[in-house]
Amino acid sequence: MEEVIKLTPDGHPKKAGRLSNLGNAFHNRFEHVGELGDIENAILAKQQAVDLTPDGHANKAAWLNNLGNAFQSRFEHLGELRNIENAILVNQQAVDLTPDGDAHKAAFLSNLGKALQMQFEHLGELRDIENAILVNQQAVDLTPDGHPYKAGFLNNLGNAFQSRFKHLGRLRDIENAILVSQQAVDLTPDSHAHKATLLLNLGNAFLMQFEHLGELRDIENAILVNQQAVGLTPDGHAAKATQLNSLGIAFQIRFEHLCELRDIENAILVSQQAVDLTPDGHPHKAGLLNNLGNAFQSQFEHLGDLGDMENAILVKQQALNLTPDGHADKPLQLSNLGNAFQSRFEHLGELQDIENAILEKQKAVDLTPDGHAHKAGYLGDLGNAFCYRFKCLGELRDIENAILFMRQAVDLTPDGHANKAARFTNLGNAFRNRFKCLGELEDIENAILVNQKAVDLTPDGHPHKAGYLNNLGNALISFIHRFECLGEVGDLENAILVNQQAVDLTPADHAQKALFLNNLGNAFHSRFECFGELRDIENAILVKQQAVASTPDGHAHKAVFLSNLGNALSLRFQRLGKLRDITEAILAYKQATENTSSDPFARYDAACRWAILCSQHQSPSSALDAYTVILELIPQVVWFGQTVYRRYEELPKIGRTINAAAAMAISVGDLTRAVEWLEEGRSIVWKQILQLRTPLDELCQQYPDIANELSEVSLALNTAGTSTRFQNIDSETKHKSVEEEAQNHRKLAAQYEELIQQIRELNGFGSFLRPKKFSELAPAARNGPVVIINVHDSGCDALIVCPSTNIIHVSLPMFSYGEAAKMHSDLISSLKAGGVREPCQNPMNYEVSTFILNEILGKLWVFVAQPLLSAVEGILYENTHDSLPHITWCATGAFAFLPLHAAGIYGSDDPKKNVNISDFVVSSYTTTLTTMLGSGSKPKQDLTKTPSVLIVSQPGTGKEFLPSVAQEVEVIQYHTSPGHTCHLTHESATVRAVQDAMHKHEIIHFACHGIQDIENPLNSAFALYDGRLDLSTLMKLSLENAELAVLSACETATGDEKLPEEAVHLAAGMLAVGYPSVIATMWSICDPDAPLIADKVYANLLGHLDNSESQKAKLTPAYALHEAVKHLQREVGEMNFVRWVPFIHLGV
């Protein structure tokens, strides 16, 4: 034909017709083979035919129609918008050129309708599908009964009704689709070439109606007509793959409803055949692969065979790779691949899977224009993925995003739409998850409201009805747990009713059966707690056992189900007292901790419950086993992949568990284990930060490549961990960059952990960065005893680590966690009453605080300090010569906030009875033993060398003015030489300038306001000229030559009362960035006291410039402060506690 055309001169009356026929031939071959060159040639030839044909020519409309059909085909293949726009343009021209009554008018209208429908499915503009239905209806109306094309036009009209139904969910549209598609089938004999296609489209309509109404006969009809279509299509026919694909989808949907294994096996079989019959490059190949992936995914979710999930992801990835950028189906392929990653995450709990799911689903949303029919679905899927990640990581930002996107999905979904109920229930789940996090009543009320809507919208018999009932029951139970005073008996009964219905509606081998059983058990559990009816807890245990039994080991939900079973068994023990229940509960908790694919929070919670039961009802050794598991899980709960802010959110619940673990170890005489556990469970975040800065000298010498890689990853991870990415997120762009940064952070954490594991497998590095054993911690006491005070619910113990003896245990029976907490509360109240906890103002009403402080210091002496000094009296003075011995306090719980260094009896009527700890020892504090070891590894300060001092002063203005700052600077400069001093003040004391200068000086002295942020501890800061130098910024520094930081600012060692084990204050920050010694304040100081303390500290530390013998007078920072505070005490009076007590030394 091409030769004939070449021989046909331009202007020949048959040239255009021959070109059009050639174009049709190329077009037909493209439909069979899928070679892009064929459709390109088809369009070229058909365009030439049109161009050669003058307006008014009898065939002009036909050539235009053919050209439009070719543009449609290229659009289906490439998804490029201009192709469907061109198709509509020329198809419309063909219609416009054709008078009413022309035999071809109906065909041209029908083809225009197809083009309009395609554009609608790409852009989602409602007017396109309205117009498509209109012109298809016109085509049908223009065609008399008996006409050979009547069935085809009815079929196209049915497809348009289906398309509008998918967008709007109007039942009459799918009813109309079935009606006209059935008419098309009925008008067509079995021998007709298009009969199979007509059956296929009728089957799709039945399928859609089934998904909307859930009536079994619809899915049966869908499978029946699809099987007829396959049976009518000979092997080798171009449409065979499409028919098999549709049959596979129908089998899969029936499987998801009835859970009969043969259906999903058939679905995979025929979907695989469809893929195998379709050559690479064919426009439908990607869609067929995607549907095969859906079938594999469905089988995986039912049977849990990981091979199915791997196949699902593999073929969906292939489908995505075959779909070019810009193609109309690209968002669909991205979203489906994201769903596969999410499904695998739900079963295996691998964080990377949900990260990938969010990435792919976000791309799908971004590629889909507003108003598109699928936009709501993609938004809902993205919200769902954020919800799952929230349950894994607990990041509040994730549940906020989930609710945001799910709300949008609901709002974009018209009433009556088949997916409206699903989007309601997903939004309800998101509200419930946020409620569990924040406890706000509005969230759980919204959760109940939208879950009820989902149930009400879903007819009985619908395959999703059980799931919606289950979610409603969960919301009701959450409401009852949190607001028992608001919940009515009817709420509880309703919760059990709907959960029972969910279980009853779900086949025994359905993938969700175990979840529904677990939730029904929780409902029975709740009713037992309310009314105490024994049958309720019996039922709870029964169904929870069924949930556990039907969940395979390794499933991500297994730990939660086991833990819930343990809870129910524990509750029955409390009622009946049968030890068998305790034994079985402990076993359930233990098994929960062993299910490594479950999320760490669930496993940690199970381990804590296991430990508590063992402590109460079994031997101490079994409790120690449980506590050992807890310590192993903590790094997963407080994980490098979280920001420091997020880690601190998890820590309050961990501290008291560690205290209980240490108490249990002490009770059996295992003192070294107690010290090791207290060390491992305290200052967790600080140790993580310091771990990222661990010198790698030995590793570098033996394995330089992996050492360099670890160093690079550590540096990046340290920066990521102190990011403030979650603050003030407003714009869409910010959201995406934040998401990218967060995922990169977690990838770095995973890479870091993998490198650590690799290093530990190297010869000689088996203990690399593992928690230190006591033998490694003991050198922390080289300069004097370290007193570790462990306060717990049932008592208080001190463990004294000494330079030359074993650990000394001193029981402190007069104290418990509650007593220490009350003392701390009294201290805070007295300071507030005296105006001391307010920003530094002068004068303060110190008298208000004196009485309570005197009482507190007296108790600390009688019940803590005196017994401890007695216990170590024999070893205190071993190496002290003429000076006082040195002691370091390392306290837990509320003791971390109490002034142990000032314990004593003051103001007694008999002066001989007055006694205080500073008469016997010089006190320091430490956050951990590891901190002291790190400081000790630095070279000893050369006392003959004059250290350089950086002075940072900021007097402030107005009410915040600090009048004595200038005097404080003067006294420091008196003891230093200009060549060894740098003074930054006013506009020169910017955040950047101070950070840069810190690297150049051994000593830094802050004479400015310090701010302790109770709500957000990492925002605690020094107030400088252009802003705050906060803790999160300081944590990014790493200083080599640092020796001493003097923080003459208010509240630099106050800490956060919710995090007693973490020392979240500016002083600890300075220890972490490399200062081995820090002088700080426990509360606001009186402004005139700062110069006095500074004068005496630097005189003792550096000596006087005019004293040639001054070198002999130099003291270490702890002793220098000790002498300075003694001087202040004499100046202001020893009963003026709020003036002299706040000054403390930390470190070595």
Image (cartoon, grey):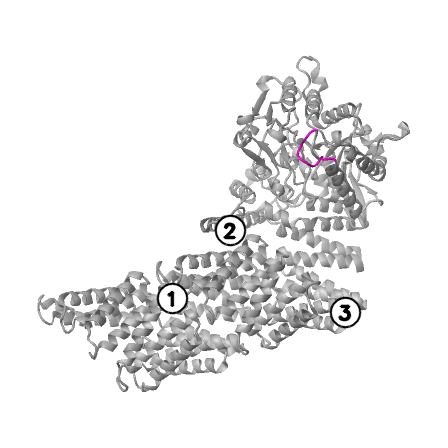
Residue closer to the observer: 184 or 74: 184
Residue 235 visible in the displayed image: no
Element marked by disc 1 = helix
Q: Is residue 788 above or below residue 381?
A: above
In the drawing, does residue 269 fall left or right of residue 760? Answer: left
First along the sequence among labels 2 and 3: 3
Q: Which residue is mark 3?
A: 532
Residue type, numbered disc 1: Ala
Q: Nearer the viewer, mark 1 or mark 2?
A: 2
Asked whether residue 841 is drawn in magenta, I would say yes
Q: Which residue is mark 1?
A: 286
Q: Which residues are magenta?
A: 834-842
Residue 671 visible in the displayed image: yes
- Mark 1 Cα shell of 10 Å, populated few (<14), some (14-19), many (≥20): many
Residue type, numbered disc 3: Gly
Q: Which residue is mark 2?
A: 743
Q: CA distance from mark 2 to mark 3?
A: 47 Å
Q: Main secondary structure of the magenta part?
A: loop
